Amino acid sequence: MAAPPAIDVDGLRVVRGGRVVLDALSLAVPAGTVTGLLGPSGSGKSTLLRAIVGVQVVEGGTVTVLGLPAGSAGLRARVAYATQAASVYDDLSVHENLAYFAAVLGTPAAGDVERVLREVGLTGEAGDVVGRLSGGQRSRVSLAVALLGAPELLVLDEPTVGLDPLLRAELWDLFHRLAGSGKTLLVSSHVMDEATRCDDLVLLRDGAVLARATPAELLARTGAADAEEAFLRLVRTAP
Ligand code: ADP
Ligand code: MG
């Protein structure tokens, strides 16, 4: 029997500001993979991630995460979420932020803060006040918060946006190491060329799943040379 998916979305409908943002969206994300949620700005990526972590009011459908309804109390320590805008305290140092969130999450294990600092490459900035960091460094602090403890599912909203190419490559390597240790990662991006970094892809357009494929399948199916062209071809041939 196949392992149950880490995320199972069925018939999801979300209305925001009087507009239907997601409609009849169904999606399964296998455990132990890095799945990319790719789509242009406004396609509904953040809204879908919010529904998966259980902070989005939904009109209809079901969202099941690690076998439980999204947002269940039992998922608190098992699911980590990094929002698109870094949600860390500007007037605390990097280390102070992490120590604070570790305490809030109830995971103040010795060495955990140092581990996540190493994973995101911020050991040298541990003592720096977050408000004085660059945008890329700030988003790495919020990624570090998401890595605290031992979440089984990491939901990361555009974690690599605004980072330099080297750092981006390092973070994707980190995501794959985490998946290799059995974690599931759902990572959004509006940058289509990040598709090649993922095990599996969800292409989102206007609140609907345009395609669900591995990067290789996507290129084979569309005959495109890269993910951006594949996306355009799918859009042009969509009903
Ligand atoms: P993405 O993350 O792909 O850029 P979002 O999920 O943020 O897309 O947005 C999807 C749609 O929902 C957009 O049309 C956006 O304008 C709308 N939307 C997002 N946030 C809100 C909000 N707080 N109130 C009303 N509409 C919103
Ligand atoms: Mg977004």
Image (tube, rainbow, N blue to C red):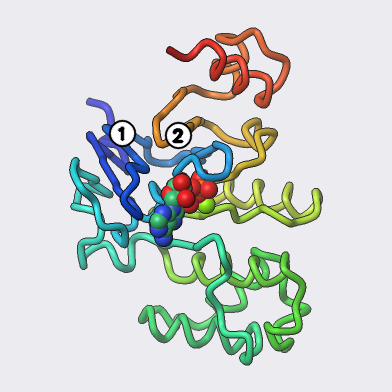
| Relative side of 187 to 52, left or right | right
SS category of the residue bearing label 2 = loop
Q: Residue 5, position in %: x, y?
A: 30, 37
Residue 214 versus residue 29 in the image, above or below: above
Residue drawn 50% across the image and 63% down it? 82
Crowding around mark 2 (Cα neighbors within 10 Å: few <14, some 14 to 19, many 20+) is some
Residue 152 at what x, y percent from top left?
38, 55
Q: Classify residue 71 by image quadrant.
A: bottom left
Query: Would you identify the image quadrant in which residue 221 lies?
Result: top right
Q: Tell me the quadrant of the picture where the C terminus can be found.
A: top left
Question: Is residue 14 shown above or below 5?
Answer: below
Mark 2 CB lies closer than 8 A to ligand 1: no
**How many residues crowd mark 1 within 10 Å: few (<14), some (14–19), many (20+)?**
some
Picture quarter with the N terminus: top left
Residue at disc 1, CB closer than 8 Å to ligand 1: no
Q: Which mark is residue 206?
A: 2
Which circle's residue, 1 or 2, is located before the other in the chain?
1
Q: Which residue is mark 1?
A: 25
- Amino acid type shown at disc 2: Asp
Q: CA distance from mark 1 to mark 2?
A: 11 Å
Residue at screen point 57% across, 66% down: 85
Question: What is the x, y in percent for residue 51?
Answer: 32, 52
Report the side of 239 relative to 190 (left or right). left
Q: Is residue 2 left or right of residue 79?
A: left
Disc nearest the viewer among 1 and 2 = 2
The residue that appears at 19% across and 41% down in the rendered structure is 61
Question: In the rendered structure, which amino acid carries the disc numbered 1?
Answer: Leu
